[in-house]
Image (spheres, grey):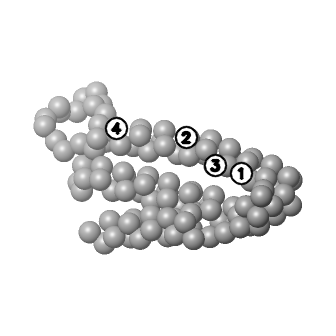
Amino acid sequence: MNLYILCFALFLVGLYGMLVKRNIVKVILGFGIMGYATNLFLILIAYREGARFPIFLPGEEHELILMVDPLPQALVLTSIVIELGVTALLITLAINIHRKYGTFDLRKIRRLRE
């Protein structure tokens, strides 16, 4: 149960970084932290104590045993790849904004746009 609370706290830290911080780089870091918290939560849901990997090896008995579900692991792997692409896109946008306006501060950028 403590790990779920830690996961939720990590998500809240990322949300705080996205909503409160004025620097674009810190907002992007908050987005990444939220993604890590989501991935951690999916792994925690899929965890089963005493479970084995879901591969039947030759020569083993195929009795009904507790096995780990590989689907959440595949979803987390896919999520990591998608998050990497989105983060690269956000960093590229931040670099272009910095080239155009000369700052990473969101308030200054809003004032310069007007």
Location of the N terminus by quadrant is bottom left
Per the rendering, the mark at residue 91 is 1
Label 3: state its secondary structure: helix
Q: Which residue is mark 4?
A: 71
Q: First in sequence, mark 2 or 3: give its number.
A: 2
Q: Which residue is mark 3?
A: 87
Q: First in sequence, mark 2 or 1: give its number.
A: 2
Q: Whole-Å distance between the Cαs marked 4 and 3? A: 24 Å
Q: Whole-Å distance between the Cαs marked 2 and 3? A: 9 Å
Q: Which residue is mark 2?
A: 82
- Mark 1: which amino acid? Ile
Q: Whole-Å distance between the Cαs marked 2 and 4? A: 16 Å
Asked if residue 86 lies left or right of residue 4, the reply is: right
Pinpoint residue 3: horizontal percent, then vertical percent. 34, 68
Query: At x 45% / y 59%, what residue is drawn?
Result: 37
Asked if residue 71 lies left or right of residue 48, the reply is: right
Pinpoint residue 56: horizontal percent, then vertical percent. 27, 31
Task: From this view, report whether residue 85 is shown above or below residue 44.
Answer: above
- Mark 4: which amino acid? Leu
Q: Are marks 3 and 1 in contact (CB under 8 Å)?
A: yes
Residue projecting furthest to the left: 64
